[in-house]
């Protein structure tokens, strides 16, 4: 028996594919020390997100990262499980999860905070709660605003 269009549509709704979510988490960048290693990992994840239809905004520096992932609920959950499985030492902390009407980002966006005076001053004075950029010390609203401002032109 062949599935009809309504059967297929109804079946897809059983797993929440029609519900878009936004998930933000923070982690420690303790596994990927070298530029080559980090570049390879980021390219791997960019391709994975493209293939699965996810969008993301990622801010990374030498010690920490903040990532917001948006897409259908089951796909975001599968991506999060894959990230945690492949990078178990990142010490992830989910800081916000919400349903959304539409995705904010356009693709897989990355901002690498350098030790330049401009990046450091911007990150520390505008959003961080400590003397160094450490998202573990930031409230979820600070993290959310930080991502919006970093990627406002994207």
Image (cartoon, rainbow, N blue to C red):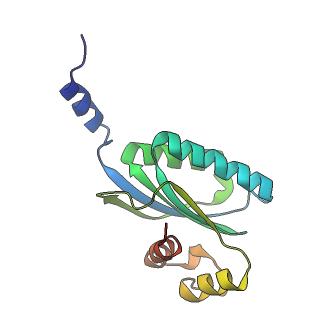
143 left or right of 1 in image: right
The number of numbered badges drawn on the structure is: 0
Image height of 24 relative to 139, above or below: above
4 left or right of 36 in image: left
Residue 111, quarter of the rendered image: bottom right
Instruction: Residue at 66%, 73% (x, y): give it.
Output: 113
Residue 11, quarter of the rendered image: top left
Where's residue 114, x and y in %?
71, 74
Residue nearer the viewer, 78 or 146: 146
Q: Residue furthest left?
A: 6
Q: Residue 76, can we see it?
A: yes
Q: Residue furthest front?
A: 153
Image height of 69 relative to 118, above or below: above
Residue nearer the viewer, 122 or 15: 122
Where's residue 99, x and y in %?
32, 58
Instruction: Residue at 62%, 76% (x, y): give it.
Output: 134
Instruction: Residue at 74%, 78% (x, y): give it.
Output: 115
- In the picture, the quarter occupied by the N terminus is top left
Q: Residue 132, can we see it?
A: no
Where's residue 52, x and y in %?
48, 41
Instruction: Residue at 43%, 55% (x, y): give it.
Output: 70
Image height of 55 relative to 64, above or below: above
């Amino acid at each position: 028996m062949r599935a009809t269009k309504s059967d297929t549509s109804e079946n897809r709704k059983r797993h929440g594919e029609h519900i878009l979510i936004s998930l933000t988490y923070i982690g420690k960048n303790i596994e990927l020390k070298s530029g080559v290693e980090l570049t390879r990992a980021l390219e791997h994840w960019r391709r994975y997100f493209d293939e699965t239809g996810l969008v993301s905004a990622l801010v990374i520096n030498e010690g920490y990262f903040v990532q917001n992932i948006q897409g259908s609920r089951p796909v975001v959950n599968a991506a999060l499980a894959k990230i945690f499985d492949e990078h178990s030492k990142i010490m992830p902390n989910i800081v916000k999860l919400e349903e959304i009407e539409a995705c904010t980002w356009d693709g897989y966006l990355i901002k690498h905070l350098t030790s330049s005076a401009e990046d450091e001053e911007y990150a520390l004075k505008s959003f961080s709660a400590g003397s160094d950029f450490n998202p573990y010390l930031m409230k979820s609203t600070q993290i959310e605003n930080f991502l919006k401002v970093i990627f406002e032109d994207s």
